[in-house]
Amino acid sequence: TYFEFYYFNLIPAALLIVLLALFSLDKLILFVVFLTPLAINLQNLEGGLGLSLPTEPIIFGIMIIFILKQLHKNTMDSRVMNHPITIFIIIYLIWIFITSITSEIPIVSFKFLIARLWFIVTFYFLGTQLFKDYSNIKKFFWLYIISFTIVIFYTLYNHYLHGFSEEPANYMMSPFYNDHTIYGAMLAMYFPVLIFLMMNKKYSAGIKFAAFLFLVIFFIGLIFSYTRAAWLSLVVALGAYGALLLRVKFRT
């Protein structure tokens, strides 16, 4: 700090991430989930690739460690590997590899392939193992909800500075989200989750009340996202939910 090398202060955090990667990969994935809403998006980097910091470098590291562990000892569930979704994903990746070879700018295409790989390996192949423990699903949801709430307050504060007008709404959530449509979509996606947490009889009154408070915050965030598609999607989803409750046949 005296010599103004402030980046050295990140060494303890980096060592913690390395320790988690080597000894507790599941906790590192959940840590990435918490960091995701708070990640900074860097666009138009060299080679036409965007990067999200600090999450994507960590996800890349998780992928490398997972591949090395599988080469040492295969621990993947055969039911997952033989599942039709897995087979289609593998075909998809092979096709990207083939088209990368024939690409006019192979370096850009292979960067795209690697970016697809680190997401799919971490959140599909490792995710299937992580979610064998049902409690990890709940942790996944709560970590994202809590972290995303910080972004909502940050966005609402920016809205407050601009008088809650619609015109600047597109970039009020920057640098965490590129625009209000992605921000609004993520808000809408978590409404069913929060309603489930609030209405599930298995949960305590404290958890239900917490879910209700978060739902109110997300609702306010959604209103001031000015994302009409997200508003409409919730109306359609509510209609679909009503059809399910009334046991309306799919054909009807």
Image (cartoon, grey):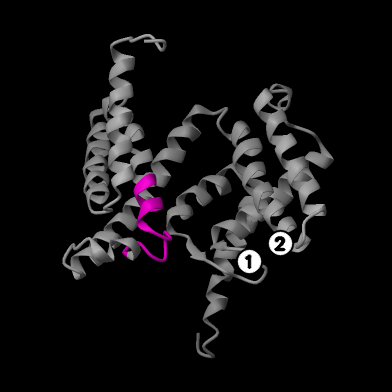
In depth, the one of 243 and 28 nearer the eye is 243
CA gap, disc 2 to disc 1?
A: 7 Å
Q: Which image quadrant: the C terminus?
A: top left
Asked if the residue at tag 1 contacts the one at tag 2, i.e. Cβ–Cβ closer than 8 Å, the answer is yes
- Give coordinates of residue 209: x percent, y percent: 22, 35
Give the total number of marks visible in the rendering.
Answer: 2
- Residue closest to the eye, 4 or 222: 222
Q: Is residue 183 left or right of residue 29?
A: left
Say which element carries label 2: helix
Which residue is denoted by mark 2 in the rendering?
108
* Residue 183 inside the magenta-drawn segment: yes
Q: Name the amino acid type tagged 1.
A: Gly
Q: Please state if 7 lies on the left or on the right of 221 as rendered.
A: right
Q: Residue at x 69, y 31 (%)?
A: 88
User: What's the residue at 74%, 56% (across, down)?
Assistant: 110
Query: Can residue 72 be seen here?
Result: yes
Q: Disc 2 marks which amino acid?
A: Val
Q: Give the residue number, with chain letter if any, for mark 1.
A: 48
Q: Which residues are magenta?
A: 172-185
Q: Earlier in the sequence, mark 2 or mark 1?
A: 1
Residue found 51% across the figure and 88% down from its top: 4
In the rendered image, residue 50 lying in the magenta stretch gets the answer no
